[in-house]
């Protein structure tokens, strides 16, 4: 008989955790990508009885069987009580926490591989925004992301679910302070580009996108901190034709990411 799941906890808003997180993954796409990537050990998968025969969940169960991962079928109420997101879609997986990437490795240009294309997150505490950015960065072929130990969301279950598997494919470095990390990037030959509504140049004029580049994205409202702005080689904006003063950070990040992609494939 399987042990009862832990009591339900409110989604964490703690931004002082020292590790990346990622040990509890919820949602069908996120769990499927966790199993498919095979980059970290998965301890078990919990499935609600109510969804165990739906095609997406059957695919998860088949892949878990191939990987030798323990599967536990629970009543929906018990699974929902263990969830840390509002809609786990009847699937929860427990895995080893994500391993931190080395910042110097992310900066390094390797012959035969695409030039480094990094995203750095400056004080983004909204897990939905962070998850969406990680998903976009992964789809756009970014080679890494940079999070800070403090004043930043880490990979909570909400981030993992919104990222829809992106956390399995985007290496993430965790640094003590972003200004010092950006200085290291510049020393390593990575161009540091801050996205700012008041930037003097348009992101669509970013001619250096084929070089090693890091896009720096700031928090909603506050934007980039003063010290981070000072560490950027340039500040660029997304042209606005009306409406609100700026785009949501996840939408702005998507526009900037795919401008880099476009220039790298011209």
Image: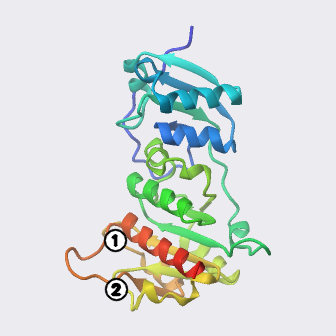
Return the residue found at the far right: 111
Inter-mark Cα distance, 1 to 2: 13 Å
Residue located beneath label 1 in the image: 222
Asked whether the viewer can see residue 19, the reply is: no
Residue 27's x, y, as percent?
46, 37
- Could you tell me which residue is drawn at 39 percent across and 92 percent down? 200
Helix, strand or loop for disc 2 = loop
Where 13 sits versus 197, above or below?
A: above
Horizontally, residue 10 falls left or right of residue 5, namely: left
Q: Position of residue 120 (x, y in %)?
A: 53, 69
In the displayed structure, 20 sits above or below 216; it is above
142, 222: nearer the viewer = 142
Q: At x 58% / y 87%, what residue is drawn?
A: 208
Circle 1 sits in a helix, a strand or a loop, which is it? Answer: loop
Q: Quadrant of the C terminus?
A: bottom right
Q: Is residue 124 visible?
A: yes
Would you place residue 66 above or below residue 266 in this image? above
């Amino acid at each position: 008989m399987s042990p009862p799941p832990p009591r339900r906890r409110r989604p964490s808003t703690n931004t002082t955790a020292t590790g990346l997180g990622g040990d509890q993954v919820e949602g069908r796409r996120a769990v499927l990508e966790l199993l498919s990537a095979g980059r970290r050990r998965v301890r078990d998968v919990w499935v609600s009885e109510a969804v165990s025969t739906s095609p997406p969940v059957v695919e998860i169960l088949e892949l878990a069987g191939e990987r030798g991962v323990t599967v536990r079928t629970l009543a929906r109420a018990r699974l929902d009580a263990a969830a840390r997101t509002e809609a786990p879609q009847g699937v929860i997986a427990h895995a080893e926490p994500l391993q931190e990437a080395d910042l110097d490795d992310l900066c390094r240009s390797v012959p035969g591989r695409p030039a480094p294309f990094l995203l750095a997150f400056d004080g983004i505490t909204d897990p939905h925004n962070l998850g969406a950015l990680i998903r976009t960065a992964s789809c756009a072929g970014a080679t890494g992301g940079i999070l800070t130990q403090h004043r930043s969301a880490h990979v909570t279950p909400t981030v993992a679910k919104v990222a829809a598997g992106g956390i399995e494919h985007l290496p993430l470095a965790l640094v003590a302070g972003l200004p010092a990390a950006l200085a290291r990037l510049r020393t390593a030959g990575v161009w540091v580009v801050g996205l700012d509504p008041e930037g003097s140049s348009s992101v669509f004029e970013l001619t250096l996108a084929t070089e090693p580049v890091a896009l720096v994205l700031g928090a909603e409202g506050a934007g980039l901190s003063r010290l981070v702005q000072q560490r950027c080689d340039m500040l660029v904006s997304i042209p606005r034709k009306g409406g609100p003063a700026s785009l949501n950070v996840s939408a702005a990040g998507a526009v900037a990411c795919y401008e880099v992609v476009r220039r790298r494939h011209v």
